[in-house]
Amino acid sequence: MPRHDGRTAQIGDTLSAAQPRPQPAARSLAAAIRQPRRGGALERAVEMVIYGTGVLTLVLLIGILVLLAQQGLRLFLEFDYSFWRFLTYPNAITDNTSHPEDFRFGIIAPLIATLWVTLVTLVLAVPLGLATAVYISEIAPPGVRLYIKSAAELLAGVPTILFGFVGLFLLVPFVRDQFGWGAGGMSGMTAGIVVAFIAVPLIISIADDALQAVPVDFRENAYALGCNKLQAIWFVIMPAAISGLAAAAMLGMARAVGETMAVLILAGGNSSITDSPFDSMRTMTATIASGFGNASAYSLLRPALFMTGLVLFAITFFTTVIADAVLEKQRKRFSR
Amino acid sequence: MTNQTHPGPVAAADPPRPVAAVPALEVPAPAVRRATEAGRAIHGDPEAVAIGLRGVGVFYGRSQALGDVSFDIYEGGVTALIGPSGCGKSTLLRCFNRMNDLIPDARVEGTITIDGVDIHGRDIDPVQLRRHVGMVFQKPNPFPMSIRDNVAFGPKRLGLARSKSQLDELVEQALRDAALWDEVRDKLDQPGTALSGGQQQRLCIARVLAVKPDVILMDEPCSALDPIATLRIEDLIRTLAEDYTIVVVTHNMQQAARVSDWTAFLLAGEERTGRLVEYNRTEHLFTNPADKRTEDYITGRFG
């Protein structure tokens, strides 16, 4: 370490009379301590930039919320559309009208459609994704693991519209001929299956990271206590990775709720309430995407779609908050 | 366990030095004297072999971590494996419950018998083996669950308890045996990770005891603990030696002198392959080492 006098300190320095110090030790130490921090300005600048990016996230979140609310609430405040009607009308017809009496738009039908697609996706994607992650993390030989993990990560990056194509040309004719679902094979179920395949690579990737992050000590301790592989995985490794596994499932769910293009072309597009996932339906995202093109600035449709966006935002927001709270409770109980 | 014929304490790989040339030892000898003066019985019955090693070598990929280790660990009492870092003592310990199986490119050669049975035999399931050969690791590592569930973990997996009350009894007994019961009896439902380091290590010992093993392996069980906690664990090891065969790896020679009945000294040469240098009664090895390298090590000249 360079000293105050610019020399590098060496063993024997203080004992050597042949090398007199330029200053008495006590004074120079005090001077060295009092020296102003070097590079302080740069450090502060970097800190400000990093702080700024953190604040930006918050600003974006609040900005989206404010925009959606400001535009969406016009439906009730400016156009006098009934709030009750918005909540309960069993259809979501995207007519471009400026007369509240002619407007027939309720959030309930797209909301139920989104729930159906999400449910189907979760039921299929979470077990499949977690099982694959457990397999590649704990069971597969290293070579196989590498291939599957790489494939999953590549798949996670494929634009979802391409999954939509594959679904449209392979799955839709198949389910139409075999099961007769929805409108010519297009249904919530069809969309849910394809969205599950969109979500699975993401779940695999994140769940695998979570499992890999479990300390090797846990594995060794489990095996040393006479566990076989499945017991070690089920009773020790997976519980230890629970927050990461839950995060993987949550992201899979967010994917299903937010997925637009594949759902738009695969779910059928029926805007009324459906009581079965095998019907043609139109989710909230698909309603916004398909309706926005012909929503003029002076119609009720435009604020109605913003309101739909606000509901979508609220759903994802609250699921995330609730999941975080549950996980935090879990973490507190078993924090290391 | 069956009584086996055995070659007795295995002599050093190198020709033993004349005893007369051994200088007086200053560091570990008082510890041994204290132990014997305290009237402690020396355990480890040379008539009964718990673990027999013949020509044991361990390879990780192409590098050989351990070579040609042959000696017998006797039933009951504590056997210490000592030696400088990288001498293969932990590697050797991990052979006894086949933990090396978990490392993809590890290979063990030679013969290891426990109670006369070859543990690499075709009919041996390592999962069953580990049930009887418990292991305590260097870092205390309670599972992220309550104290009770930590101790009950093994019995539950292995189906050792038929009822809730039986399980509670098992948990209490294991915690008592690990000298932890009085400290945790009122907080069994709190997370095991909330305990202090020494308590966590005793919890890990209780977790092993609950499985009712015959042999307990300890891999530097005190290296992450403070001196007071270390002494408590050492006391516990001595107490457990009444009922279990214990093999403990330590880099702390005083600890080996305090807790063990038999000591094996391992050393890795230029080629980084650990070999057994000397194995004898602890008291004997520390006061009267047969090999110059043992003497150098225990007097602190290296390592």
Image (cartoon, rainbow, N blue to C red):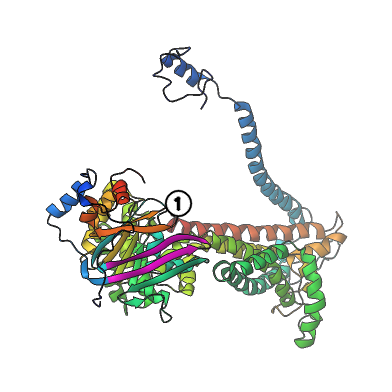
Majority secondary structure of magenta residues:
strand
B208 sits to left or right of A51: left
| 10 Å crowding of disc 1: few (<14), some (14-19), many (20+) | few
| SS state under label 1 | loop
> Residue B236, image x and y in percent?
24, 59
**Where is A99 relative to A144, above or below?**
above
B62 sits to left or right of A304: left
Is residue B63 found inside the magenta-colored segment of the image? yes
> Residue A312, image x and y in percent?
69, 61
**Where is B78 relative to A117, above or below?**
above
Residue pictured at 45% horizontal, 17% vertical: A30
One can see residue A253 in this view: no
Q: Which residue is mark 1?
A: B270
**Where is B297 relative to B110, above or below?**
above
> Residue A108, image x and y in percent?
70, 69
Instruction: Name which quarter of the figure residue A11 lies in.
Output: top left
One can see residue A214 in this view: yes
Q: Nearer the viewer, residue B284 or A2?
A: B284
Residue pictured at 55% horizontal, 21% vertical: A36
Q: Quadrant of the N terminus of chain B?
A: bottom left
**Where is B211 relative to A45, above or below?**
below
> Residue A1, image x and y in percent?
51, 27
Q: Nearer the viewer, residue A301 or A120?
A: A120
Is residue A190 found inside the magenta-colored segment of the image? no
The residue segment tinted magenta is B50-73
Q: Amino acid at mark 1?
A: Glu
Q: Nearer the viewer, residue A250 or B157?
A: B157
Chain letter of disc 1? B
Instruction: Name which quarter of the figure residue A164 lies in.
Output: bottom right
